[in-house]
Amino acid sequence: MVERYETSLLLLCLFSFSALVLASSPCPLTGLPLVRNISEIPEDNYGRAGLSHMTVAGSLLHGLKEVEVWLQTFTPGTYTPIHRHSCEEVFVVLKGSGTLYLASDSHGKYPGKPQEHFIFANSTFHIPVNDVHQIKKLITGKIRRHGYFLL
């Protein structure tokens, strides 16, 4: 459950996948309720201490064709690895703050010196396809409650 962590950064991530990736994993929506309680969705940390990850909606689990929504919680001092994706990402920072490192030349073998961007509660940002990035320097923020609808 997300509430058990002393969170520093709570991210809602929206991924958009290419048609090629989706063609390999068609899943029907049979058996899943239309409205679900987030507190009942299973969490995982993928072997990374300080991470709580849940797939709120996605292509493999829920049969969506072009979108995947994640809810991630990071404890203070944790960070993502330096990485890239073959899809776009959209983030909504629900609470906390940190630094987004985004490579200035993401398409080369060595992407160069990253640009630093401050991220904070109620901010949003997107990562273009294949752009190398990392989220780091996470600090605790005040809890603010909001409703988010992604259409």
Image: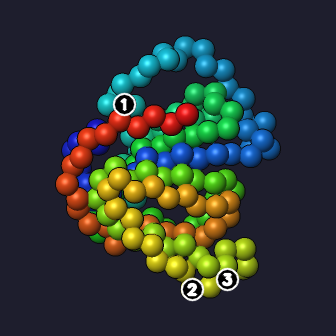
Where is residue 34? Give x, y as percent. 49, 17
Q: Are marks 3 and 2 in contact (CB under 8 Å)?
A: no
Tell me, yes or no, if residue 57 can be seen here. yes
Image vertical order of residue 59 relative to residue 29, above or below: below
Q: To which quarter of the image does residue 121 belong? A: bottom left
Are there few (<14), some (14-19), or many (20+) residues within 10 Å of tag 2? Answer: few
Circle 2 residue: 113
Q: Do the residues labelled 1 and 3 touch (CB within 8 Å)?
A: no
Q: Give whichever of 148, 43 is nearer the camera.
A: 148
Does residue 136 appear to the left or right of 28 in the view shown?
left
The span from disc 1 to disc 3 (Cα, nearest Å) is 39 Å
Where is residue 44? Give x, y as percent. 41, 44
**Residue drawn where x is 40% and y is 57% of the image:** 123
The span from disc 3 to disc 2 (Cα, nearest Å) is 9 Å
Quadrant (top left/top right/bottom left/bottom right) for the N terminus: top left
Q: To which quarter of the image does residue 110 belong? A: bottom right
Image vertical order of residue 40 relative to residue 30, above or below: below
**Residue drawn where x is 45% and y is 55% of the image:** 124
Three-letter code, disc 1:
Ile
Which numbered disc, 1 or 2, marks the residue closer to the eye? 2
**Residue drawn where x is 41% and y is 22% of the image:** 36
Which numbered disc, 3 or 2, marks the residue closer to the eye? 2
Circle 1 residue: 38
Q: Give whichever of 71, 49 is nearer the camera.
A: 71
Tell me the element at label 2: loop
Three-letter code, disc 3:
Tyr
Where is residue 48? Give x, y as percent. 40, 58
Does residue 149 appear to the left or right of 143 in the view shown?
right
Are there few (<14), some (14-19), or many (20+) residues within 10 Å of tag 1? Answer: few
Tell me the element at label 1: helix
